[in-house]
Image (cartoon, rainbow, N blue to C red):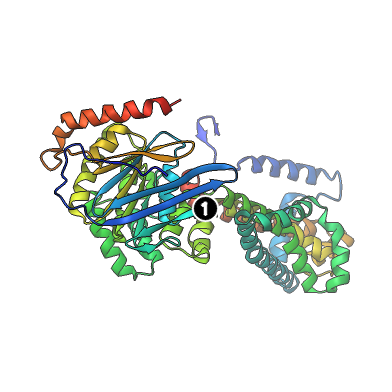
Amino acid sequence: MVMPQIKDPIGHLEMRAPPNAVVARGVSKTYGDVEALKNLSLEFPKGQLTSLLGPSGCGKTTLLKIIGGLLEPTAGEIEVNGTPVKGPGPDRAFVFQDFALLPWANVLRNVAFGLELRGAAKSEREAIAEKYIAEVGLSGFEKAFPHELSGGMRQRVGLARALSVDADVLLMDEPFSAVDEQTRRKFQEDLLRLVQNENKTFIFVTHSIEEAVYVSDQIAILLPRPSRVLEIIRPAIERNKNVDNIRRDPEYLDIVDKIWAALRSYVE
Amino acid sequence: MTLFGYRLPGMSSLILWGLLWEIVGRSGMTFFIPPLSEVFLTLFEVIGTPPFLKALSETSYAFAAGVFFALVIGIPVGILMGKNRLVDELLLPWVNIFLSAPLTALVPVLMVLFGFGMRSIIITTTLFAIWIIILNARAGVMQINRSLVEMARSFGATPMVAFYKIYFWAALPEILGGVRIGVIRAVKGVIIGQLLISIVGFGALFELYANNFLMAHFWAVLVVLFALAFTVSEFLAYLERRVSYYAAKR
């Protein structure tokens, strides 16, 4: 097996690497004869955002669901904070591509639903939900139903739900792909702030190269058939300077070009 | 519909049909159809009499019990069939057969198995209602958004919790649709049961009036029965509309 190389374009070699929140070791997943993942190993440093990037069919969502405990790997194992994953657990929370909101429940109950399933008392969980509704900028919409909200607002509800259970690891499955371009940019900026402020580990699935480079501390480029890690890139972009300047940073542009050069032959 | 600039309330056409009935009745074409006015006079005469009230309570009891069993068995079985492939393969052929079978022909068998009393009537009512309730609950569950189920699992829902917090609510619009049709079929079932198994309730009244050529009485009871069935069905349709806001957005 070829170990994925770790590339550090600027070279913060003197910085000590943070401990890993999630480790995937030799994970394989087959559906009948189809190999979705083959012997994949990957490390996700604590407190950072790691993107899984790749063309469709490269198994990135499958890997995310295995980490989430929603799918069982055919071989290999996942460790979260040193404990092997045997199913869904309170240390991980999911944000879904299609939001997965209860259409019959209002925003407050939707945000509190994760806590409701974990058995929190009504007053307690609603107080927590209120806090995160305000945090994602939806104050005043507590009594609204999902069908009354725009796509972007619905995903904010999904995000607030994932945040309110206070899990160490946030698993995001193409969370911004179903919202329009402007909302998406706003989301990316908010996500950067979230990674800085919350002491959480983010695993972020996307098929957008620009998005991955913009938001990630670490990008794992996956290739399809058979699925494998092509490369791990750690963009050294000064993020806390100004979010507006990131897209003009030469480092940002170089990495986008480089990833596209690596991926273009795999896109049919 | 509007007529000469006036908006007509719903079902105004019934007035027209009522008039036609009155005319046919007054012309004395057939003893089978007395004038509608006479039917309504008889109706007010009959309502409140002990035999009528007894028939009403017997029929309501059998109907309510029959529908109750159809609901508490039908909805969970339907949801289970929608969730579980194996259960579905096992039960679906039978549900489809019974849905389209002439159930009236089964009533004599039920009499042999369960006797001539209320029990057989309730079972007949349940048998008429349950199949469509099962099929609709199943269809409702099968179209559930998979990610809702994954969401519940990822936040730690046990299968039992997912059953009543996700599956039931997500399938509710279809379930209510099935319940409405099932209840209408249950009306059919309870009357057929009362006519064939033991002559009680409204079945007994129909039998009595028809045999004695009391056509006005016969029609009066029929009008009451239609009105009751219609009311129940409209009430369920109202509940269905209450949940339809999310039916298209799951």
Determine the residue positioned at 74% across, 58% down: B128
Q: Which residue is mark 1?
A: A74
Residue in front for this viewpoint, B249 or A263: A263
The x, y position of residue A107, in whole percent, is: 34, 53
Q: Secondary structure at mark 1?
A: loop
Residue A100 visible, this orientation: no
Determine the residue positioned at 79% across, 42% down: B24
Q: Is residue A134 left or right of residue B227?
A: left
The x, y position of residue A31, in whole percent, is: 56, 46
- Which quadrant of the view contains residue B61? bottom right
Determine the residue positioned at 45% across, 51% down: A27
| B68 up-or-down from A110: above or below | below
The x, y position of residue A230, in whole percent, is: 37, 37
The kind of residue tagged 1 is Thr
The x, y position of residue B171, in whole percent, is: 55, 53
Q: Is residue B83 left or right of residue A78?
A: right
Instruction: Residue at the far front: name it.
Output: A1
Determine the residue positioned at 52% across, 53% down: A74
